[in-house]
Amino acid sequence: MTRLGRYVLKSFLKPLLFSYGAMTLLVLMAELMERLDKIIAGKADLGVIARYLLALWPVRSLELLPVAALLAILLSLGQLSRRMEITAAMSGGVHPWKLTAPLLSMGVVLSLFSLGLSEGLTPWANRQVKKLWNTDIRRLTHRKPTRFYNITVAGPGVFYAIGTLDLEKGRMENVVIDLVRDGRPDRQIQARTARWEESGWTLRNGFERVYRPDGRGIERVRGFQKSRLDRNDPPANLVPQEPDPDDMSQFTLRHQIQRLKSLGIATQKFEVELYMKTALPWSNLVIVFLGIPFAFNKRGGKVRAVAVALAVAFAYFGLLQVGRALGQKPWCPPLLGAWTANFVFLTIGGRLFWRMRSLA
């Protein structure tokens, strides 16, 4: 890296660290003030509060880091531009692309850091935030329900549709069980009642459909008054649990999507969240790319930089949510929905960079 590149990078890193630290502190303090009444009511000690805020840090960092990077770009390059240092460098034959290359490289580094944070630390931290808030701060002790109605539960090679599930009695009513083998329907069992006995389900008053080996058409049907299900799925495992993509890494979420697909369950929502786990970290590079042309403007000072950063951040995260909603529609590819904001801002940034040629 040239001496000029190191100088530009140093000018960027100082406001980056300050902006990131200041915004993180403000967000955590705002979170604390917003929930202060419940924290006082729960009589949480300082150690629990500190652990809660510490776990919240990586969760909020994914959204704060791109804004801090944009603000640092506007402050550092804006100051260099107003002091005519950029003009002097370009007068000496330095192209704007060469001048800003270290900043784009830093955008890549920030994106890779965010990817590592998103994949490694954030899922665990998100689970810790929920646990600390519900158990250690609010001290929730609500009795869990024991009866569930009209539920569907998927497992490896099986799909349950249950009219009534009673955990205390270990009993199901109006149950349909679809068994899958190698991604194809194998059997379907319908029973009026089922009871958990001797580590297994005993089905009563129903019938079983056996599908052909290719999964197309029914090979035979038999009725029964009593039948034993050759699976070990205890009642507690059949309680419907909606998985939270925020609690999963990309690897875990991708595995969840494949499992649901094998059972014929719609996965559009989870696919959008999977692609969001890469779209949000790469927003660091996108935001840096967009912010550089804005920073070349000599007009305005720190107030203008903060205003531009807030406006761009508001527009980006607003568009990010619009893309997330669109990606859950059947007609919109999940990848396109998750990356809509990045594609739009890359296009705008590319257009602004193209206009920067006149500065060379």
Image (cartoon, rainbow, N blue to C red):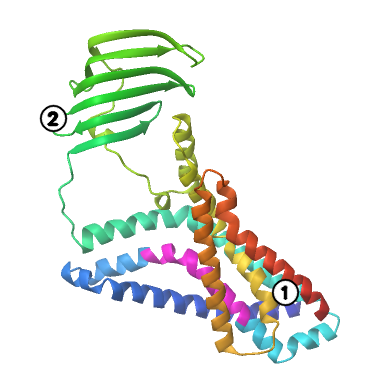
- Residue 334 image position (x, y, % from top left): 55, 47
Q: Is residue 360 visible?
A: no
Task: Name above or below for residue 303 compared with residue 25.
Answer: below
Left or right: residue 193 compared with residue 272:
left
Q: Residue at the right extreme?
A: 93
Residue 40 occupies quadrant:
bottom left
* Residue pointed to by mark 2: 169
Quadrant where the N terminus sits is: bottom right
Left or right: residue 241 compared with residue 249:
left
| Mark 2 residue element | loop
Front in this rendered view, residue 52 or 163 = 163
Amino acid beneath label 1: Thr
Amino acid beneath label 2: Lys
Q: Is residue 180 visible?
A: yes
Left or right: residue 173 compared with residue 22:
left
Magenta span includes 71? yes
Front in this rendered view, residue 227 or 207 = 207
| Mark 1 residue element | helix
- Residue 223 image position (x, y, % from top left): 28, 9
Front in this rendered view, residue 203 or 256 = 203
Left or right: residue 12 compared with residue 29:
right
Magenta span includes 334? no
Label 2: few (<14), some (14–19) or many (≥20) C-alpha neighbours in 10 Å: few
* Residue pointed to by mark 1: 100
Q: Which residues are magenta?
A: 56-74
Quadrant where the C terminus sits is: bottom right
Task: Name above or below for residue 260 compared with residue 278.
Answer: above
- Residue 38 image position (x, y, % from top left): 21, 69
